[in-house]
Amino acid sequence: MAAALLIYLILAITLRSWSQPFIVGLPIPFALIGVIWALKLHNIPLGLMAMIGLIGTMGVAVNDSIVMVHQINSLWKKYGVRSAELIIEGAASRLRAITLTASCTLVGVFPTAYGVGGESGFTQPLAFSMGWGLSASLLLTLFIIPAMLLVLEDISFVSKKLKLKFKKQNQSQAVNEIQQNVLVNQFELTPKKQDLNY
């Protein structure tokens, strides 16, 4: 628990956001789904080696997510605007790097998983975990993370508009109260002036 909190704090400081670390961590559940699905289809138990492969898959998936989110943040900072076009541009600019990284890992892992060139032995569950887990998380990194960043920006935009609306309402109410107080004071002072004339 302490390690997860420390990782979250490091990501929050690096990305300068309290919400983006959750988006960066989104590939982890999909990697877990890919690992469980692959082990179930191939009748391989979830043992120690499969867990080690799952941990390695999570590391690669989160690394790809950080690369994409950091690129999008850099474009936002460069142009000073948070738009859907910049999210698409940032995701497209990192598409080749993320795809090549994952492809190199998959090309090295799948032959081991399926015993191409010889029996892989006790490393087979590790290879299955990394191969199918990374395949599942790669799709999320490329498509779902940019979409979630756009959703997050929409939520932030709506919340800012609501805050501005409530602030204007509070200001108008305060102005009305001040005007009413001024009118009441003027009404109270007017009879006193008339009494002084008498």
Image (cartoon, grey):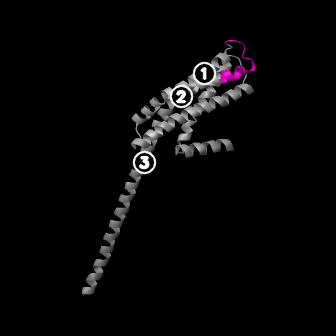
Vertical arrangement, residue 140 with respect to residue 83, above or below: above
Farthest left residue? 197
Q: Quadrant of residue 63?
A: top right
Vertical arrangement, residue 63 with respect to residue 117, above or below: below
What secondary structure is the stretch in magenta mostly built from?
Answer: helix
What residue is shown at x 59% (from left), y 31% (from top)?
61
Query: Mark 1 falls on what kind of element?
Result: helix
Residue 177 location (% of width, % of height): 36, 64
The answer to whether residue 12 of the structure is visible from this angle is yes
Q: Quadrant of residue 196?
A: bottom left
In the rendering, which numbered label is found on residue 106?
A: 1
Q: Which residue is mark 3?
A: 160
Q: Which residue is mark 2?
A: 140
- Packing grade of label 3 (10 A; few <14, some 14-19, many >=20) is few
Gap in angstroms between the C-alphas marked 3 and 1: 43 Å
Which quarter of the figure is the C terminus placed in? Answer: bottom left
Which segment is the magenta one? 116-129
